Amino acid sequence: MRQTDRLALFPIGAVVNSAGHLVVGGCDAVDLAATYGTPLYLYDEGTVRARAAEFKCEFGRRYPEVSILYACKAFINRSLLKVLAEEGLGLDVVSGGEIEIARSAGFPMSAVSFPGNNKSLAELSLALDAGVGRIVVDNFDELKMLGDLAREKSVKVDVLLRITPGVDPHTHRYEATGTLDSKFGFPLAQAESALASAMAIPQLTVLGLHFHVGSQVEDTEAHEQAISIVLEFAAKMAKKRQFTLRELSVGGGYPVLYTIDCPVPDLSIFAEAITRTVKNKCDELGLPLPRLVVEPGRSLVAQAGVALYTVGVTKNVPGIRTYVSVDGGMADNIRPALYQSRMEAVIANRMEEETAGPYTIAGKFCESGDILIWDIHLPVPHGGDLLATPGCGAYNIPQSCNYNAFARPAVVLVGDGNARLIRRRETIEDLMACEV
């Protein structure tokens, strides 16, 4: 395989310039590394905007009323939120911290939805004070807490109930959220009781139902099954409890292309299956069409992100493996160790050279599991080379840590040949700032 074959994994418009360097968002990756240091994360603004537009188009042209909410756990940054607000997206938050960041960015709070399995009293209070548009109620304790809080504050709260439909999405077990044995949501057997309790609280307006089957789900079957199950429940509750389903959130979980040899379905396949199933099932059950809520996270920003590392030492174990170490690893990119995720990479300063190997890309952290990529073919790596890893826009920075006193990387937003620092590199002083 030629390195240039991997360009399809990089942000839209990534190219190789006349110097043989990788160019992202019109910016030479080698120049960016020289300016900002490594490890360094790049986010291509054009790719983020294109993916936002694609979600709006693919779902919007198939269904009358659609809201696209970015699940910001994938990566939250005020500059990114401003871009997404300009694109007309809403926001899905899962913590008080994410609410505060969104509010500080001037994000319209009425377009924010707040799920999560263990919201604290303080977080719920913050959400009500901030004017968060929807609270997605996850359990009975939260339902009581929210009702009491709404009464105390004399406010009306729009809520959705999160249902666990008992569907297996056939993904990594850490990424499955819609199965019966899950920490999230009301099991279907408890859903009627939850709905009745919520409808009995005058301060709460139950607008609809929410589910999320999991992440990196590579076919539409789980979504279709879950939609049918949840709509059948809604139809039953319409007759028995006079419940009107005005909103249906189908979550996210749409897959991302991480390696050339494992293609994933196009977004249009999911949009068609989901909207068709909702419309057909509502027609079958005699339900009016609810507003459809879609919550992409990874699938909106993963392709936009690129991690840049500097190659360090090489270790050859004759007859077994050649390890090539870089200056980052599991502290900024935990997915390979946590989920056994596969990725690819290129030598960004020598894109046109022939590949050799295989080489195993190792991180610098004191764990044997700190391996980013097993057995990848690259040009012979040398110390000082620049390794670029695509598909790093989702979860890498949010899940990063300070293991081995590692200072989290800087983040740069690129586009139209311009680069802007949107998160500075941490310093050792930052790491010690909380010590007393």
Image (cartoon, rainbow, N blue to C red):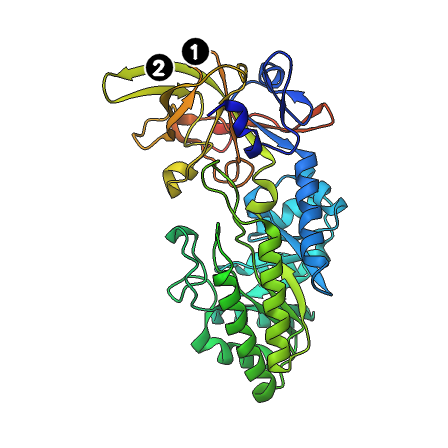
Residue 150 in view in this figure: yes
State the image quarter where residue 282 is shown: bottom right
Q: What element carries label 1?
A: loop
In the image: residue 234, left or right of residue 292:
left
Q: Which of marks 1 and 2 is nearer the N terminus?
A: 2
Q: Label 1 is placed on what type of residue?
A: Gly
Q: In which quarter of the image is residue 285?
A: bottom right
Residue 433 picture location, percent across and down: 51, 30
Disc 1 + disc 2, Cβ < 8 Å: yes
The amino acid type, in three-letter code, at marker 2 is Thr
**Which mark is on residue 314?**
2
Against 429, residue 393 (above or below) is: below
* Image coordinates for residue 151, horizontal then vertical, percent: 64, 73
- Residue at 50 percent of width and 23 percent of height: 3
Mark drawn on residue 26: none
Quarter occupied by residue 305: top right
Left/right placement of residue 411 relative to residue 118 reads right
Q: Give the tally of numbered discs.
A: 2
Labelled disc at residue 383: 1
The residue lying at 36 percent from left, 22 percent from top is: 359
Residue 90 vs residue 228, the one in the foreground: 228
- For marks 1 and 2, give the CA distance: 8 Å
Residue 39 appears in the figure: no
From what the image shows, is residue 232 above or below residue 66?
below
Crowd around label 1: few <14 · some 14–19 · many ≥20 (10 Å): few
Which residue is most to the bottom?
Answer: 240
Image point (56%, 30%), residue name:
306
Q: Could you tell me residue 61's position as x and y percent?
A: 73, 58
Residue 327, position as x, y percentages in the image = 44, 21
Name above or below for residue 243 compared with residue 106: below
Element type where label 2 sits in the image = strand
